[in-house]
Image (tube, coloured by chain):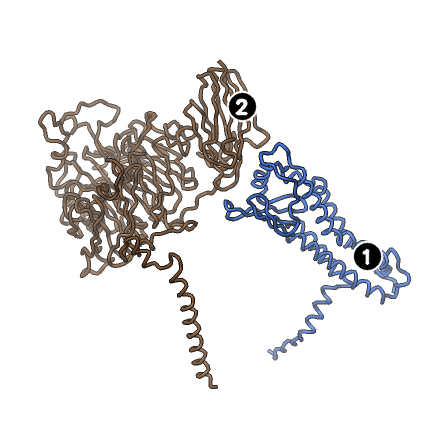
Amino acid sequence: MGAVASPRLRRPAEVLRGLAGWVKGERGAGLFAAAVGLLVLSVLLPYWTLHLSAPQYPQGLDVKVYLTHVGGDVAEVDELNHYIGMAPLAEAAPVERRLSLVGVGIAALLLLLVRYTGRRVAWVLVIPVVLLPAIFAVDLFTWLVRYGHSLSPAAPIHLDPFTPPLLGSGIVGQFQVRAAFGPGWYLAVLAAALAVAGSAVRARGCRACQWASRCWAVCVEQRAGWHPGRS
Amino acid sequence: MTRTRFLTVAGAAGLAFVVAVALLAGRPAAQGQGADLLSVARSRGLSPDEARAALETYVPPGKYDEALMFASGGQGGQVLVFGIPSMRLIRVIGVFAPEPWQGYGFSNETKSVLQGTAPETVGPVTPLTWGDTHHPALSQTGGDYDGQWLFINDKANSRMAVISLKDFETKQIVENPNSAIDHGATVSPNTDYVFESTQYAVPFPKTKYVPLDQTDYNASYRGVATFWKFDRARGRIDPARSFQVELPPYWQDLASFGKGPSDGWVFVNSFNTERAIGGTLEHKPPIEIGASANDMDYLHVINWKKAEALVRAGKATVVNGMKVISLREAVAEGVLYFIPEPKSPHGVDVAPRGDYIVVGGKLDPNATVYSWSKVQQLIAARRFVGRDPYGVPILPFKEALAAQVKLGLGPLHTNFDDKGNAYTSLFIESAVAKWTLGPPYHPESEAWKVVDKIPVQYNIGHLATYQGDTVRPLGKYLVALNKWSVDQYRGIGPLRPQNLQLIDISGPKMRMLYAAPVGIAEPHFAEIIPLSKIKAWDVYPVGTNELTLKPDPNAVQPGKERIVRKGRLVEVWMTAMRSHYTPDHIVVSRGDRVVIHITNIERALDATHGFGLNAYNINLSLEPGKTETVSFVADKPGIYPFYCTEFCSALHLEMAGYLEVKP
């Protein structure tokens, strides 16, 4: 047996460069793929959480708002809410919940289409994913206002209309309430950031592209790739 | 600076810092409110030992006891659950008597258990409203508590109950068809069988009338050893697979299953082998005198694996629905042997390794210890010194002995610790004796010696050490179940509580820690299990039937509540939640049969509701998730409010409704 060649040790900078290259991929493709992955993952996680604590609930109660449904201790919170005449949580945002998956799907699909589009159109496809976290927050806030301002007058306990906190702490009855965006929302924000970063990487590549002057709606280089005969 | 010198300096500086912190932290604490423990103890008149005991048993609010003690509730017909070491009464479990707090005996489900009308009941069962619980037995796997089930007998009516430790509710009661009064409940090492033995002999079969005179008593009265088959998968005793062994009309008493080398055998004490039946008005000696005439009674040694095989081979006869191995068959097949034991014993307890059998003499100052290997050899060699009037072979007393240990007056019941020691209650002496077992627990030179004794207040019956009747005793704690409290509690009238005392057995000397009065009935016997072994549910999954612990077909979801009338039957599917019932009006006509299925749709811990109905003797306890059914005939016209009997919420008083019975 011959001597075993010792493997060449790579320098950290080299490793980082390799990693960066892998993440960016060809004109940011890796970043877009990661953004799509995070977006899909975010659907499985709560976008917003509400933690309620009171003496008789040592563990506290948690409401978890996902894009598609409400989870956590909803039954108990609904039960408590009926005393102040608040509608059941699961009845909120029926249209948004039904459309959310379609919306996220379209946003993800558009990200996947970026590589086939010309540089002047590509940034348009990134808009939905960038807006998603904001749309969620605004919509949630309108529902919080609606719920807090449409308390049943027949409820046993009369409260002045109020808006539950979208973020931060508050006190409702004996409950100390803490509201925060959930891991799903943060993943969506990260997905948006990656998509923007991907766009930037791609724009740099496109500026250097030999077809730069000729591309508009469709990426000419990709089209060239589709016809392997052309140089 | 050298390395060594640096370390020295650093070490000294560190030490100085620690001392400074300790001084600073200690000073304000010592002056702080209530922080000077010594002055607190002094002001309360506590001795240093008492103050220490208080610290060792105090469980602050929000913290948990390390173990649970399941004690029988005696004439209350219940099971009592205490925390150890706090000795706080944490739960009461209704078993043989209606228990309104749990709604036990009011809903159709619990009524069927209590009255024995549930499936799998044998023999004639009358709707009894009391029982006398004596011997709780936790289920075992491999001779160790597994925390799944609890069995308890009703001495007064020869019944056995099964309690699930998932929800601490009674699931089944079976009545012994061939016995009137039973004593002892004990389980085999893997809970294949729950054992009880007859106490006071009656005609066999029980349904036959035989006059009470000596000749007839001797000829036709019998005891039985009952092996209730436990079907663990279904969580029920299966009477069809249970069996009995016919015994002479001696009064059988407590029993213990063998384990390890003695697995497959069960040991049963007896007294009144004189077969005294009393007759005080006819100037015959009372039973207590007649039954104590002989110096020896018989320890029954029963080969239950052989008996089980005989039953499988079809050698049993069916008596009142139970398979019974006859006395003749038991003798012929080598199922039953006797060994003399000092008269009127009480406890028979098998050492953790299954090698010694300890009998408490009660009227004899000794703990009599039999060696299982010697007993086995005697049986194998058929070394019999004679036979009793029923032909049962008697083994020689002296040759079966490992030792007799002189403990004191009235040795009664023995448990064990993790260091090879035995603890025996001394009834007459009002004390607990700690003594050493022989090899392999202790070398011969230290074996069979009393090493400590502690007085208890007063007249101790049974005792319980931590897991003390299993193959893995844990030592640490002993609870003395004292029958009399005499002067321990004041200002409570003539009926005195029982007195349960917690004793520390972790050191060489036993130390009294705490006493808990029990003012609701008389606990006889107890078992202590680590809390970590109990995997109880916190709430039921919504719509659970408490007997099956599975979804109840009559569970109803919110929005699906309804009232359906069919002729004279009015059936209601109701939900309960904070703070209303749906529906809250039920209108029926006089004479209608009303069936109400109520589901507590709550999921929050402790969100229990009640359902108390005026004038109809109904109260239910609906723990979160439970579905219960109650039925009654609306025979009294009028307006009857029903309401939540468990304070559930701020609008608890508003949780009410009306039953309207039209004339």
On the image, the x and y values in percent for residue B597 come to 50, 28
Amino acid type at mark 1: Trp
Q: In this view, which residue lies farthest toward the left?
A: B283
Pointer 2: what residue? B585
User: Is residue B200 depicted above or below A9 in this figure?
Assistant: above
Q: Amino acid at mark 2?
A: His
Give the letter of the chain under mark 2: B
Residue B336, located in which quarter of the rendered image?
A: top left
**Quadrant of the rendered structure where residue B548 is?**
top left
Residue at the (55%, 28%) spot, across then down: B582
Q: Could you classify mark 1 by the number of other residues whose Cα lies within 10 Å: few (under 14), some (14-19), or many (20 or more)?
A: some
Mark 1–mark 2 distance (CA, rounded to whole Å): 64 Å
Q: Give the residue at x 73% y 56%.
A: A192
Task: Give percent across and percent down for residue B179.
Answer: 26, 30
Tell me which chain appears brown: B
For numbered disc 1, what is the local secondary structure? helix
Indicate which disc residue A123 carries: 1
B229 to B86, vertically: above or below: above
Question: Quadrant location of the C terminus of chain A?
Answer: bottom right
Label 2 sits on a secondary structure element that is strand
Chain A, colour shown:
blue
In the rendered image, is residue B130 in sight?
yes
In this view, the residue farthest toward the right is A214
Please give left or right for residue B553 compared with residue B427 in the image.
Answer: right
Mark 1–mark 2 contact, CB under 8 Å? no
Image coordinates for residue B207, horizontal then vertical, percent = 26, 24
Rate crowding at label 2 as few (under 14), some (14 to 19) or many (20 or more) other CA atoms within 10 Å: some
The image position of residue B118, as x and y in percent, is 40, 29
